[in-house]
Image (spheres, grey):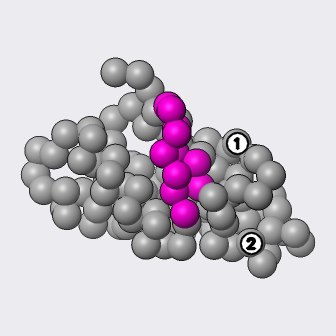
Amino acid sequence: AKTRDALQTTARSIGRAIGADAKACARARAGRKRLLAGTVDALASQGYQPESRAGAVLLRNCPFHGLVDEHKELVCGMSLALIEGVVEGAGVDGVAAGLDPQPGMCCVALKLAKK
């Protein structure tokens, strides 16, 4: 449990830094649309393959897929923490990362709140 907690804390911290960089690239006072685009680009740069769908952004792959079969709970928890950190660091309102396992996809998806 301590190892899992440390991994998730570190992943979230790294995610926040990635998200903060995405926010800086989107410029000061950027709106939700631009911040979301920056967040999607940041996830793509980390090896995810984001795909926008109505009300969500699905991730068509997991950059850690080589570890998922043996350590699914650990890897999915770390990936969720990383992506939560990216969203938090980017400051995107109305976007929440959550577990949404689907065949052939990353176990994490972004849900977009309606405006």
**Dot 1 or dot 2, earlier in sequence:** 2
Q: Mark 2, residues whose alpha carbon is within 10 Å: few (<14), some, or many (≥20)? A: some
- For mark 2, give the secondary structure: helix
Circle 2 residue: 65
**Residue 92 location, x and y as percent?**
33, 42
The three-letter code of the residue at mark 1 reads Asp
Q: In percent of the image, x 65 and y 64: which residue is there? A: 61
- Residue 81 counted in the magenta span: no
Tell me, for residue 111, which label it has, or none.
none
Q: Amino acid at mark 2?
A: His
- The answer to whether any part of residue 94 appears in the image is yes
Residue 100 disc label? 1
Span highlighted in magenta in the image: 49-59
Q: Quadrant of the N terminus?
A: bottom right
Q: How many marks?
A: 2
Residue drawn at 19 percent across, 56 percent down: 26
Question: From the viewer's perspective, is 78 left or right of 57?
Answer: right
